[in-house]
Image (spheres, grey):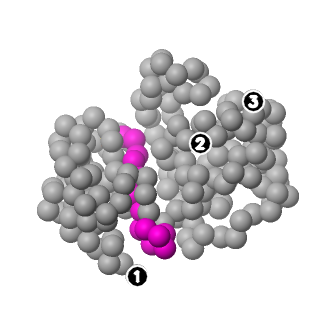
Amino acid sequence: MANPIQGVWRQGSPESGYGRLVLYFVPTCTSEVWPVQAEPTLPQLRELVAEFGPGKGHVLPALHKVQETYGYVSRPAIEVIARQLNTTAALIYGAASFYSDIRTAPPSHEEIAWCSGPTCRLRGGDRIREAIQQVLDLPLGGHSDDHRYGLHMAQCNGTCTEAPQVWLNGTVVGGLTVASAIELARKVKAAE
Ligand code: FES
């Protein structure tokens, strides 16, 4: 399920050239397709992105469509998108790795997205992250071996009144303290 369009400040992009401050409106994708589906075939991927014509403006919509359908954007999917958009796989991969809401690896069953935005960090977001990482014993961007839980970095989505916050499977968990973050992480780790 796609989330609403959100305004996000980003430092440049693969399309604009890094180093410029640009306001983007990108759909965040928090679809949880789990257990991960079988790897789609190339014809399935081609059909999925067939609506997109050549042009860099279709990079994000195509990436999101694949992720919403299959839970993440695999390497073959990157190559199919590149061919469909008449560009290079390197450009598609660059965009996929630049945008923190695009996954290039299968999602975990319980996925915590830690907000790295300025308001969350001013309100103690780094201590929240450290506490969660300590409980889950994961680096940022990591997941358990069985993909039952994972942690990745996310961008501010404008709901800063709830800072510091994370998203658990796409649902905001705001007003966190170190104690409540530890409790959340323990529940995530214990979830079946
Ligand atoms: S800084 Fe975290 S939601 Fe805005």
Residue ID for mark 3:
55
Q: CA distance from mark 2 to mark 1?
A: 30 Å
Position of residue 71 relative to residue 27, above or below, is below
**Which residue is label 1 attached to?**
192
Going from the N terminus, do you reach mark 2 or mark 1 first?
Answer: 2
Name the residue beneath numbered marker 2.
Answer: 96
Q: Amino acid at mark 3?
A: Gly
Asked if disc 1 and disc 3 are in contact, CB closer than 8 Å, the reply is no
Mark 1–mark 3 Cα distance, whole angstroms, equals 43 Å
The kind of residue on which mark 1 rests is: Glu
Q: Is residue 128 among the parts visible in the rendering?
A: yes
Q: Is residue 50 left or right of residue 32?
A: right
**Label 3, label 2: how many angstroms apart (C-alpha)?**
16 Å
The verdict on residue 146 being magenta is yes
Q: Disc 1 or 3, which lies upstream in sequence?
A: 3
Mark 3 lies within 8 Å of ligand 1 (Cβ measured): no
Local crowd size for mark 2, using a 10 Å CA cut-off: few (<14), some (14–19), many (≥20): many
Q: Is residue 36 above or below residue 167?
A: below
